Image: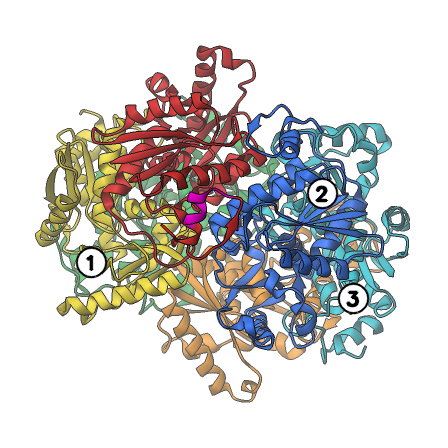
Chain colours: A blue, B red, C yellow, D green, E orange, F cyan
Amino acid sequence: MRLLVANPNTTDAITDACAAAARAAAAPGTEIIAVTARFGPAVIASRAENVIAGHAVLDLLAEHAGTVDAALLAVSHDTALDAARQIMPCPVVGMTEAACLTACMLGGRFGLVTFGGVELYRELMTRYGLESRLADIIGVNAATAEADADSIGSKVLAAARALAAEGATSVVLAGAALASLDNRLQEASPVPLLDGMACGVRMAELLVALKLPKPRAGSYAALAGRQASGISEPLGALLRGDR
Amino acid sequence: MRLLVANPNTTDAITDACAAAARAAAAPGTEIIAVTARFGPAVIASRAENVIAGHAVLDLLAEHAGTVDAALLAVSHDTALDAARQIMPCPVVGMTEAACLTACMLGGRFGLVTFGGVELYRELMTRYGLESRLADIIGVNAATAEADADSIGSKVLAAARALAAEGATSVVLAGAALASLDNRLQEASPVPLLDGMACGVRMAELLVALKLPKPRAGSYAALAGRQASGISEPLGALLRGDR
Amino acid sequence: MRLLVANPNTTDAITDACAAAARAAAAPGTEIIAVTARFGPAVIASRAENVIAGHAVLDLLAEHAGTVDAALLAVSHDTALDAARQIMPCPVVGMTEAACLTACMLGGRFGLVTFGGVELYRELMTRYGLESRLADIIGVNAATAEADADSIGSKVLAAARALAAEGATSVVLAGAALASLDNRLQEASPVPLLDGMACGVRMAELLVALKLPKPRAGSYAALAGRQASGISEPLGALLRGDR
Amino acid sequence: MRLLVANPNTTDAITDACAAAARAAAAPGTEIIAVTARFGPAVIASRAENVIAGHAVLDLLAEHAGTVDAALLAVSHDTALDAARQIMPCPVVGMTEAACLTACMLGGRFGLVTFGGVELYRELMTRYGLESRLADIIGVNAATAEADADSIGSKVLAAARALAAEGATSVVLAGAALASLDNRLQEASPVPLLDGMACGVRMAELLVALKLPKPRAGSYAALAGRQASGISEPLGALLRGDR
Amino acid sequence: MRLLVANPNTTDAITDACAAAARAAAAPGTEIIAVTARFGPAVIASRAENVIAGHAVLDLLAEHAGTVDAALLAVSHDTALDAARQIMPCPVVGMTEAACLTACMLGGRFGLVTFGGVELYRELMTRYGLESRLADIIGVNAATAEADADSIGSKVLAAARALAAEGATSVVLAGAALASLDNRLQEASPVPLLDGMACGVRMAELLVALKLPKPRAGSYAALAGRQASGISEPLGALLRGDR
Amino acid sequence: MRLLVANPNTTDAITDACAAAARAAAAPGTEIIAVTARFGPAVIASRAENVIAGHAVLDLLAEHAGTVDAALLAVSHDTALDAARQIMPCPVVGMTEAACLTACMLGGRFGLVTFGGVELYRELMTRYGLESRLADIIGVNAATAEADADSIGSKVLAAARALAAEGATSVVLAGAALASLDNRLQEASPVPLLDGMACGVRMAELLVALKLPKPRAGSYAALAGRQASGISEPLGALLRGDR
């Protein structure tokens, strides 16, 4: 299967890191096609950047609609995930949602660790209806840590231990900056650490394997006859239902 | 005060109708400046259109940032409301949120009537944390009704009566297509009907009168130093904090 | 418009302070009529006092029913707010509810600061269905602070900073003793401070401007034919529907 | 033990009916002292009446404070229940809360049947935090039914059957007008019917038997030093802590 | 009445302690029949032990079905409570649920103190729909404390004080190891301490006194015609409906 | 990988059907080992049967602990799922939870169709914290339908259509009796139908692929030193931590 790893950020380095993580996690037959948003924020870290990137990721996905078997959004905010599901003819997976749902399958409540502000992740959990499965969110201060991978690791491990002490059965690492930390810290952590790219790739493979049809009714059914201006031709075509 | 009525749809007729409704509702000293999105869907009625219009409305607001005292989003989906609050130096109001919060001040639970699908409005109520204040949502079938204003009125009135019977103290009319119906049907309805434009204009005036400062911390504080490409210069300037 | 500021406490000094705050916040055309409960607790600060004052405030409102355009309850417990809405022919606003709904329009979650016990405010938030919009409540210890306005200010500011750190976008100051603190502390606070009297006056003006009819059905419709003994004639008249 | 059955309505006939029901339900050693509010609504059936009766029932309870071992509020709205608990030196039980908590001990979810409007009962369930244990509330139309006990019985039985079909394991009959119906309809109902007076009497006996001390801290601790005017001497004494 | 105190643990010492506590709490006419599970964990303290003991307690109850007027489960996890209610012809009470519902009748929110892990109790509260009535759960570290009753008492008292400070009106002591502590610590605690065995015995007496019929419909109705193998004859008979 | 399909019912025909469904859904390298409970109910359809089967399925899993890479519970009640996760050294998946979490990845809310009573499934959804993702549950009357596969299909399809009309994006088929219906009805249904065995097999494969360690702390950590009597040697060994 062909899995589109779509980076809503415009930073190629993030795309490369996510592609590498995706390839490391994928099953043998899964081909990773990694692409970067054509416009928008370099790194999504605020409400406004997330909204702009929402348009950018739909634009990006539309360009590849019909040529891939599934898409995985390479951003911990799961930017525009539901809209992407509506317009795309294939399954679309968000890396944080995928990790949280995987965490649910380990039982009990999960914790979430991220860099910086936690409020957008709290809202995301509410949107997913997962509040009662969430033990807590800890925002690690990344200010000076970026220069020092060991320091980041120590902070994330401390957060995982704190969340386990609060009752978390597992901990989701949310944020591209945390990618690959799961492998390095897994052994030292009292509870399993879940990486969004790894969970996302496997969830995408699962959805493709299940061969579920697209909803033909309701708010996720494909669009038809919708008009728009000033957007890319491929995206416009998906709104019109021309593809 | 100068109130920007920003239409995230690209249809001028909607802008005109909303501007008229806003002027009818405004206090004497309120000047209405009505503007239309430069790109995006003609009419927002789906998840994908709402995401694209999110970018469009930020683009539109950025163009007017600093020249108005408040902004009101002229779309019942309150498109990109929180991101708009983050980047704008003035209060930003969503018409459906404004009507729902006004309904709360009448006591008890409110109902909501819209055209077509109700799922996006249900999610909006969850996002606002207003589920327990919501009696129910009724989606009026507008298929053939558009040609016949009387028929629409009858359907909306029937919905308002049904919601009152379910315990609603008031009913929010959500959707530009329902604008002005509140006045026509108010007398025949067992409970008050709330129009988003009227409530939104008055809420914007209230926020301006309160002279509240913008948050200097947290997820609604102004941005600074954020980089993006392929977006309008005014929007980029707000991300960089250049204004 | 004529706005009744009804103080359910029997302490005239509170009435005067609230009247002054209301006048400072009101629009030019708003006349403030400040009145004090005829009986009941000097200062409402417990469950039992709040219940007794509930009768007292209905008694007080009934006396002025038909002579004012709106009423604002000058007590942070929003005492008997829903019953007042039922019997009065005009809009009735609670100062804490008004501040909380204003806070909702700033986005995200709000904090609440009060003096002493927080449990009644927690229950009020549950009654309003605003739990998910509430970041936290902090009860400032006012024991020795009353003699020292600067000390109160420092404690409230510290509470506001703590709430902002927990993710609050704004902070509601609940309690007459906190009135006017919003202006003094606004500049030093990381997030906007909301005063119940200021928000309440403006919300009352908004409701009057909207000219909404009173519900004719349901649990907020005017009463008729209800019998009672040992209550004031004006209140009895509202129960009987004689006015 | 001496159990005060306090009727917040001013209608003696309700007091008599409740006293009879209480005596029928009580254990051998329980003496029932039935008393009627000195002022307030004849029959509580609205928000405003419930607030006025709140003062009346505190007035009534205060008169008997110290002379009884427990108190049971003889009104399905559990009027002023929490305030009563705060000021009284003995346990205070609400008949609807008692029936709902008894229903919880039968497992699963319960239904609730009442006469007329359901909105106040819905709010009561929310206040008790029992929403997830509530299957549904049905308001039986009592307009013409009062003249005909058989007709009432049929309607209540139909409601009980409908609630059982929705998944209710038991049904609470809320409202003095439904008293004694539980015995008559018990056999025909698919699930047990719970009467508030019977459950309330037994719950009061249980609390007395447990000999629990009154909270010495928090929002239910006895009051002291609180001033009020225009209220009865016994009630004032409880606020001052003179008893 | 005859009250079966059924210990799902296989440790006789727990049965004896619970029987003594039950006898101390019971009304004069209540005969306590204390029995111990025939198989399963010595002491239930984990998910798996709780599941195994679920079968064991049904096996134990079935042996006594028809010979007792009510049953009380002598384990703080309320093991298999709902299933026990389904198969038994008499009321079945869980000691922790009984204590929590008693706590509700004292008003406000309650706290819960236990030994060791709190996660299973948190899930129990969710299952009972009592989250909003729960102030917090504190797990006292019992590692070295078992040898020293005074030390346990100090820790439990400190927990009760912390819970009261968080707003709890009462505190439920959950765990056989905490039995009888309520009497010793009651005076020193700022809020009442509730013991599950005492509350459970009285709740069982209440249910017997109310003479409620067993549901004849729904998920708690008696079983009939259900086949099973490898289980005890009395339990099999209850599934088949032969008794 | 070796996947244990553990049937907690004692009916071999169910095991065979589930094994066939599992093999049809599995990836090429997945070997299905299907086993049947040694004791307990023939078919789990009530609270009591579910509890007895909880012990039976732990007994069954223990027998195979260490010889398989993952286990899938072949029963729509996800019997003893969390306890199984605690004791087993490998991932354990419940078929209904797996289908519901898969449904979450399709976006929006899902519906659930089952045979007969819905109350246990409602409680399961609450336990999983998925209430807000659940559109509704429909219990198809299977009384006479069992003899007629076409009739069952028609009823399930009607239920799926009703759930889609209520806003469901997908529909979970819960119950062994519904196995394989997803394939037959998929084309006629307006929204995708999800089968628990198919989703469960794929979720088990996903968890094995992720190579997550078992929690070493908290309520899902492996047991050690726990004593029990009258249970199978393999199960006892897992409690003691001997394996």
The residue that mark 1 highlights is: C181
Q: Vertical placement of A121 versus D11: above or below?
A: below
Q: Amino acid at mark 3?
A: Cys
Q: Nearer the viewer, residue A166 or D48?
A: A166
Which quarter of the rendering shows the N terminus of chain B?
top left
Q: Which residues are magenta?
A: B231-238
Residue A144 is inside the magenta segment: no
Q: Is residue C60 visible?
A: yes
Crowd around label 1: few <14 · some 14–19 · many ≥20 (10 Å): some
Q: Vertical placement of A239 versus D214: above or below?
A: above
Residue C218 x %, y %: 36, 29
The residue that mark 2 highlights is: A91
Q: Residue E234: name its quadrant.
A: bottom right
Q: Vertical placement of A126 versus E51: above or below?
A: above
Which label sits in the foreground, 1 or 3? 1
Asked whether the residues under the numbered discs 1 and 3 touch, taking CB atoms below 8 Å apart as contact, a structural biologist would say no
Q: Main secondary structure of the magenta part?
A: helix
Q: Nearer the viewer, residue C149 or D84?
A: C149
